[in-house]
Image (cartoon, helix red, strand yellow):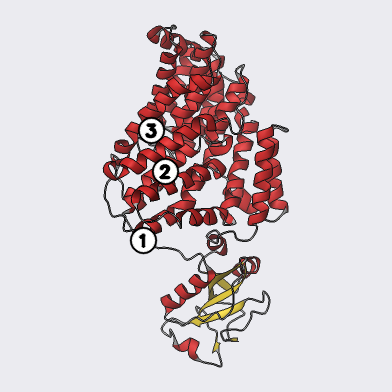
Amino acid sequence: MDQVVIAFGLLLAVVAAFVTNRLPPVLVAAAVPIALWATGLLTLEESFAGFGDPLVIFIAALFIVGEALVATGVTAWLGKQILRRAGRRRGRLTLVIGFAAACLAALISINGAVAALLPIVVVVAVRAGIVPSRMLIPLAFAASAGSLLTLTGTPVNVVVSDIAAQSGGREFGFFEFALVGVPLVVLTVGFTAALGGTLLPHRVAERLDEQASDPEESARAWGATYDVEVRPGHHFGPDEGVIEILIAPRSTLIGRRVSPGMRTRDENLVVLAHSRLGDGRASDADTDGVVLRAGDSVLVHGPWESLHRYAASSDVIAVTSPRSLQRGVPLGHGARRVLTILVTMIVLLATGLIPAVMVGLLAVGALIITRVLTPLQAFRSVSWESVVLIACMIPLSTAFIATGAADVVATGLLALVGTAAPQLALLAICTVTVLLGMFMSNVATVLVVAPVAVAVAATLELSILPFMMALTVSGAAAFLTPVSTPVNLMVMQPGGYRFGDYWRAGLPLTVLYVAVAVLYVPLVWPF
């Protein structure tokens, strides 16, 4: 069977599997290298070459850097500082939240930005008397727009930059994406602020309780839960926290007498209060303390490093992981180190002194050496589903080019739209990208469409740069369905959204993005 026919058959099967969504996307992607080898389109080494691609390693490193910013409270601090000054009007709130989300997305990725701001936005909206459904889709859309501000804003940017360099062009600069990203951020945030109240539904979703990130607030919230008076009596430092632990069934602590104000033996943590099921305030009122039993709840305070070690002890059971609480503490332990590493990474990426993958690996190494993250934390912070998906889809793009299938599509597309106006070819490519992006991740969509864009540019003897940048812009226009991008799904339940709510606000923006890709991009990156 002709290799072109096999390549088309495999591509259609992959697209159909993504669109029907009956199998996990990562499973569909994992089957691609196997199929490429089994059909003889690529050798075994070529089929799995994506896993050794520097692009994939760099993307994995970006996930780790983003986790460090969240874990040390940098994103929590930035979000609270901005939202604290937002006021109570929906339009102004949307503007402030939108620009905050865009800036965060440029630094730590779309998913990280929305995850960091989502609980804060819900709380601010409730306090302002606004239903979250009027605020959360604008949050997701603004983060998608913000991904176009820097090279590291989304894996798509890294992918198209790499493809551009391999196709006779050059890599895009770190801030070069901002030439189109800044106008789109302004347009996106302005649109949702002006018309979001009309286009977005008024729905009441499941309530998200505000989590206290301040140790003082955490202590008082614990006391209110157990009806125990908590009087810390001293200042909490920025590197300190509060956690609740339960005495384990076979704990060596059973039988020991504790009272508020005393310190633990090994970690030197301060005992703030004690409660026993059914006892409540009475267990805290005894000035002589109380003898610990299995199942007792104790509130302890101290440095985060000591809390981590204490929570890992077999003597206690941590009700809430110190790591999850620490993420909400603005500018917590290690924040300065993370910011120093981030600035250094950005400078190196912007200057291009060393390859991007080496910059990413050096940043990860610095985070581990300075003890901002442990190796296990770094490993767990990587979205391995995204990494595997990209690594498995890269060989499909390679096969589509190597077999000549991309040339066949490009020839058919040019026969349809003609060769006189390259903008028409650009429009066709962007339209296909948007349609596929309704049901597939934008990374997978770009990897499928990119070979066609490369073939069209080569046939027309035009620069690859406008085609790759237009592909990036149309890939970012993931506004039409909740499955277009993970952040759309992240806000769906908290906002109480339905499937059809997205296209009402997303369709005008999608048209706008395609127009920018077709008309504005070639002005900045000429054919």
Mark 3 lies on residue: 439
First in residue order: circle 3 vs circle 1: 1
Q: Which amino acid is tagged 1?
A: Arg
Q: Secondary structure at mark 1?
A: helix
For marks 1 and 2 on the same chain, the one whose residue lies earlier in the sequence: 1
Q: Are marks 3 and 2 in contact (CB under 8 Å)?
A: no
From the image, state whether disc 1 or disc 2 is nearer to you: 1
Q: Nearer the viewer, mark 3 or mark 2?
A: 2
Residue 209 appearing in the image = yes
- Camera-side mark, 3 or 1: 1
Give the residue displayed 26% in from the left and 50% down from the top.
202
* Res. 356 visible in picture: no
SS for callout 3: loop
**Disc number at residue 484?**
none
Q: Which residue is mark 1?
A: 127
Q: Is the residue 245 above or below the residue 53 in the image?
A: below
| Residue situated in front as seen by the camera: 382 or 517 | 517
Which residue is disc 2 drawn over? 140
The picture places residue 129, in percent across and down from the top left corner, at 31, 58
